[in-house]
Image: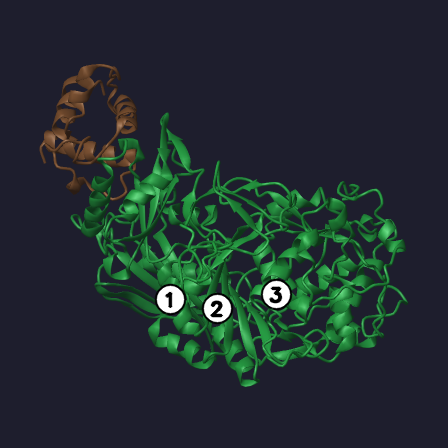
Chain colours: A brown, B green
Amino acid sequence: MSDSAKLELELKQLIIDTLELEDITPDDIVADEPLFVDGLGLDSIDALELGLALQKQYGITLDAEAEDTRAHFASLNALRELVEARRER
Amino acid sequence: MDTPGVDTPPDEFDFLKSCLPHMSDARQPASRATARSTEQDAAQRATSLIHQGWRQLARLAPAAPACWLASPGQPLRPLSRAELMARVDAWHQWLDNLPAAHAGRRPGARWVLFQPTTLGACVQLLALWERGMLAVLPGDDRPETLARLAESSDGKLPETSAAGWPPEQSGALSSTGTLSSTDSVGSTAAPNTPFEITPDGGRLALELCTSGSTGEPLRIAKRFDQLEAELAVHRALWPLATDASGTDSASEPSTGAVSLSQVSHQHIYGLLVSLLRPLSEGVPFLSEACHYPEQLAAAIAQLSGLGHRCQLVSSPAQLARLPQASDGSRVAGQAQAQVLRVFSSGAPLPAEAARHAENCLQAPVIEIYGSTETGGIAHRRQHETSDWTPLPEVEIRFSPAFAVRSPFLEQPDQWWQQADNAAPVAAETSSQGEQQAAPRFQLLGRSDRLVKLAGKRVSLSAVERCLSAQAEVLEVRCLPMPTRDHRLGAVVVMDESALPQDHASRRDLIARLRRALMPGFERIALPRYWRFVTRLPLNAQGKFTADSVARLFADLDDHRLPRWLGETSSGPQQLTLEAEVPDSLCYLEGHFADQPLVPGVVMLKWARDLGRRLRLAGVGVQESRFQRLERIKFSNLLLPGMRFTLAATLVADSHGLRVDFRLESRAGLHASGRLRYGAETDSAADSSPLSPPLSSPQTTPTPEAS
């Protein structure tokens, strides 16, 4: 498994665990589908919680108000790219 | 414990001196004209619930049955009015034998009364009332509940024996007629009425605790005149004397009806309809509630055979659990028009359940709408209409908010605002062209169901209405999750055939339901946690309580648990659990690299946990006596997301006790076998090993089950 694929699986599990998505398994999360609109149907509280989890796990600090936060959370692929670019641990 | 009763009026002793000579007539509804006049009038009305009613009945026909005594595995046997009185007198004796300094001896004392049997509650209530004392009725006897009541009461009455005697009087002592501690006359002495009290109707009779689905239970006091007024309305609407000859049912033994109950007498509805109603009319009642359909069928069969007709006091939870078609014929066949009528209260009865119950019991099913504070408000029979008709004496108004005014209220002249929404049904005109007197109405759900989620107001009723409109949804409850801030859960009732059976179908269903909500609601109002059930898990009072919510969502916080979706029971020795395998179950990994599954040992653990909650003649298995597994078979893989049933039965055989279990799903059998326990030689049983525990099958699991 490539590093990228490993990170993808890790992130899927992070989303599921953090947001307690009880009916979702990693296989259910499609990497290029939107996380917040139709795909997983996440909401603003989920975004906050996910932000906290990213900070805890990878040391990434996001500005909750900034426009690009939305872009980072658009899909799992976008999230993976964010972590790869800005992770501190 | 010796706190002075704050509710005791200063002239508490006055009615002791003023033993009014007149008898009030138990059969006559109290004059309604006076009901709302002045409080003074109400206070002067004598109550028939005490001496002047039932003592009088007992004197007129001492041998007539007052009660049918149920014992496990045996036919019912009648207990006469004289025998019932002897028990009341024995409880007087018990009170008299308290130390002289005990605060519970004085008139006006407040006694906590929690009894598993109707008979036990009956004799204690009468004993307290005849002594001018007040009964405090908690809805349960959990230690926290009792601790909360202890400070404001003078004590808790001990549990009666199965036959209604005080503890020291059961067994040998009752036959000697004397008590060991004193030389006083015991229970079998000629019943002499210790206090000839004619209490005024304005006196407090009891205090009830509401079963509140959230927060602290409230305590609601009831005066005799409130109870009397409601009993009179019931008598007029739904007579119990079934013989048309006009025989005086008060003085003659009533050969007609017997009152059966499936609900607790610790709450207003059960107390009033299943206990005070038969008691005040001299109609015998069954000594304990029939918590299981089998008990009910047996009681109806026996009483029918003796020529009695039964009035059944039930609840939506119980009626929905009447056996389905195959077994149903058993209840119906034996009932054969022997059921006079069925009452249901506590929550609206789903239309399908109402139809099923009418078929099954061959009797009209009458629903009563009300609350602890208001008593009864309205009634309906869904066989005829889904509209509610206010009870006689009850006034209704719809604006500015749905409110009621009735002599059953603490303040009969004031409007009481109900927490429900209601809309009047367009008034029909009768054949005479007159307007119908009572404005019928429809209930539209509770009005107080706005919650704030992440700063946004969300109407739970609106979410529920939207979900209910989906084809597969029969009924739905939305609720803020107790342990997850800002998150909603949804409990969705569906037809069995539509239930999701695996991960994929569950996920599709949830996605469909969420999509239905998306156009009309903020994202935050979309439930995050979903539970799909065949019926709402209701408590014995028909309420969907915090306990049920906790069980439905327990797997969120304990990843060792299956996801609880309901359970059914045909008796204390049998339980069938409905559940799902949560995707977050902690045991799923580590068996096959690519296939998470539930290991066999986990299925055995679940079977063991279920088995521990079973009782056979009051006795359960002891873990220390576990011996071995027998006939264990693992057939199909049990995968995450699968819905399954786990059935367990406690069986006694020549080797001791065993728990037979089967874990099945739509895909077939997953596991089956037996857990063998050694013979029960020493006593794990309680003091009365013959009486099965009377707790409802839907109460929370016993501590040893965790």
Parent chain of label 3: B
Badge 1 marks a residue whose secondary structure is: helix
Q: Nearer the viewer, mark 2 or mark 1?
A: 1
Left or right: residue B258 versus residue A42 is right
Left or right: residue B404 versus residue B594 is right
Tell me the amino acid under the disc marked 2: Tyr
Tell me the amino acid under the disc marked 3: Arg
Query: Which of the labelled discs sits on residue B355, or is there none?
Result: 1
Q: Which residue is mark 3?
A: B235
Question: Mark 2 or 1 closer to N-term?
Answer: 2
Q: Nearer the viewer, residue B99 or B522?
A: B522
Residue at mark 1 shares a chain with residue at mark 3: yes
Residue drawn at x 28%, y 45% is: B467
Between the residue at mark 3 and the residue at mark 2, the CA separation in whole angstroms equals: 28 Å
The reply to whether discs 1 and 3 touch (Cβ–Cβ < 8 Å) is no
Q: Position of residue B452 (x, y in %)?
A: 39, 30
- Residue closest to the far front: B432
| In the rendered image, the vertical position of residue A82 relative to residue B64, given as above or below | above
Q: Position of residue B653 (x, y in %)?
A: 46, 78
Between the residue at mark 2 and the residue at mark 1, the CA separation in whole angstroms equals: 20 Å
Query: Which of the labelled discs sits on residue B292, or is there none?
Result: 2
Parent chain of label 1: B
Tell me the amino acid under the disc marked 1: Arg
